[in-house]
Image (cartoon, helix red, strand yellow):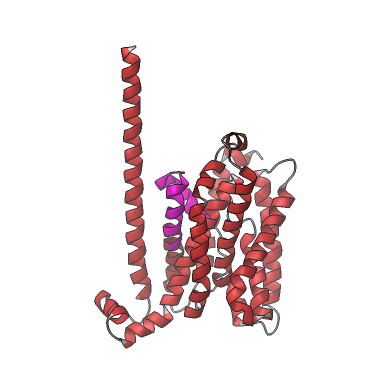
């Protein structure tokens, strides 16, 4: 009896030690990502022919007028802020979709949400530019329609993760073709072209003002979805036995995920694979608990997309490669690796 008690106490102590170790690792990871993001923000602001030092940048932003800092602020900072906001939104969207669909291969770009939102956005910008501020909301409608199509067409006595991906690829191709066709029409605006191509080169503070409120609201809603995401990791029968409304949670979390992906697409264009890569890296570094995973996706998504945009600006300067293309180049092999390395999807 005494030995059993001692074993139980030893096991509990070992569990506590593991929990402390995971918590320390997660805290260290958050610290490293935050420092890297701040450093990259400064590096991105100084990428180009005009450079300003840290002290000059601080003084020019907060203390006194500086022409060089003002130029950097007007030309580079909008692009930086859009990269950060869009990256955070798409990464969290992917995290939420993976929880809802119980499919680690889910990504708003792969399953057609981004392309549906992109098509709605180009229609608004091309046909009713006076409604530009409401473009994210109308893009949300397009993303929601795309998600409903994927979900409905994938249902066949249940939802197969691989079937969702295959239907999503088809829906993505459909809306991408429609958006490209509209964008290639004569007289289409540069705004339409920038959305179709995922180009954030000429974005201004007006675009930041359009994107920021929606992203802020969407990320706040995502934080309120953390408990629901953790419950959705359980079997549906188990969650219902605990008094959890699984169907309502899926609908609400899906709406938040669609909102985040759509509003980012409305301004930055379709961003593929970011919502796939970031949650996977997050689960390795901070675990599967969404209390840590969602905040990690916010920070690391912002870092990764800003890094992609900075690389695209510098790798063949003075020419540029859009951040969306950089993410596709990196994310394609990552997706193939996940698909081939998972027995769960290889047999479906």
Q: How many marks?
A: 0
The answer to which of 91 and 51 lies nearer the viewer is: 91
Quadrant of the rendered image containing residue 262: bottom right
The answer to which of 325 and 77 lies nearer the viewer is: 77
The answer to whether residue 179 is left or right of residue 235 is right
Residue 347 is situated, as x and y percent measured from the top left of the image, at: 64, 38
Q: Is residue 262 visible?
A: yes
Residue 268 is situated, as x and y percent measured from the top left of the image, at: 54, 70
The answer to whether residue 81 is left or right of residue 325 is left
The residue shown at (68%, 85%) is 187
Magenta-highlighted residues = 274-302
| Most common secondary structure along the magenta stretch | helix
Residue 335 is situated, as x and y percent measured from the top left of the image, at: 55, 52
Query: Which image quadrant: the C terminus?
Result: top right
Residue 277 is situated, as x and y percent measured from the top left of the image, at: 50, 54
Q: Is residue 91 visible?
A: no
Quadrant of the rendered image containing residue 67: bottom left
The answer to whether residue 24 is left or right of residue 280 is left
The residue shown at (62%, 34%) is 237
The answer to which of 103 and 3 lies nearer the viewer is: 3
Residue lying at the far front of the rendered structure: 243
């Amino acid at each position: 009896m005494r030995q059993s008690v001692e074993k139980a106490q030893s096991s509990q102590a070992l569990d506590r030690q593991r929990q402390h170790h995971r918590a320390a690792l997660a805290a260290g990871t958050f610290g490293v990502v935050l420092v890297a993001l701040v450093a990259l923000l400064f590096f991105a602001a100084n990428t180009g022919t005009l450079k300003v030092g840290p002290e000059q940048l601080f003084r020019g932003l907060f203390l006194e007028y500086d022409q060089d800092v003002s130029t950097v602020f007007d030309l580079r900072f909008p692009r930086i802020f859009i990269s950060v906001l869009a990256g955070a939104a798409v990464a969290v969207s992917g995290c939420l979709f993976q929880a809802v669909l119980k499919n680690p291969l889910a990504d708003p770009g792969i399953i057609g949400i981004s392309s549906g939102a992109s098509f709605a956005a180009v229609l608004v910008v091309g046909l009713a530019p006076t409604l530009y501020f409401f473009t994210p909301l109308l893009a949300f409608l397009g993303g929601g329609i795309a998600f409903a199509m994927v979900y409905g067409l994938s249902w066949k006595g249940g939802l197969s993760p691989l079937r969702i991906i295959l239907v999503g690829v088809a829906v993505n191709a459909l809306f991408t073709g429609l958006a490209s066709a509209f964008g290639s029409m004569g007289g289409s605006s540069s705004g339409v072209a920038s959305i179709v191509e995922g180009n954030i080169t000429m974005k201004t503070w007006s675009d930041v003002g359009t994107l920021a409120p929606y992203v802020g609201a969407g990320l706040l809603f995502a934080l309120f979805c953390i408990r629901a995401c953790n419950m959705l990791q359980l079997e549906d029968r188990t969650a219902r036995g605990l008094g959890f409304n699984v169907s309502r949670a899926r609908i609400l979390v899906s709406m938040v995920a669609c909102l985040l992906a759509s509003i980012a697409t409305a301004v930055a264009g379709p961003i593929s694979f970011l919502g796939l890569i970031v949650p996977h890296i997050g689960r390795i570094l901070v675990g599967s608990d969404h209390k840590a995973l969602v905040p990690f996706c916010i920070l690391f998504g912002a870092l990764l997309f800003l890094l992609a945009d900075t690389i695209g600006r510098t790798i063949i300067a003075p020419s540029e490669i859009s951040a969306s293309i950089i993410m596709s180049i990196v994310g394609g092999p990552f997706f193939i690796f996940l698909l081939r390395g998972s027995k769960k999807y290889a047999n479906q």
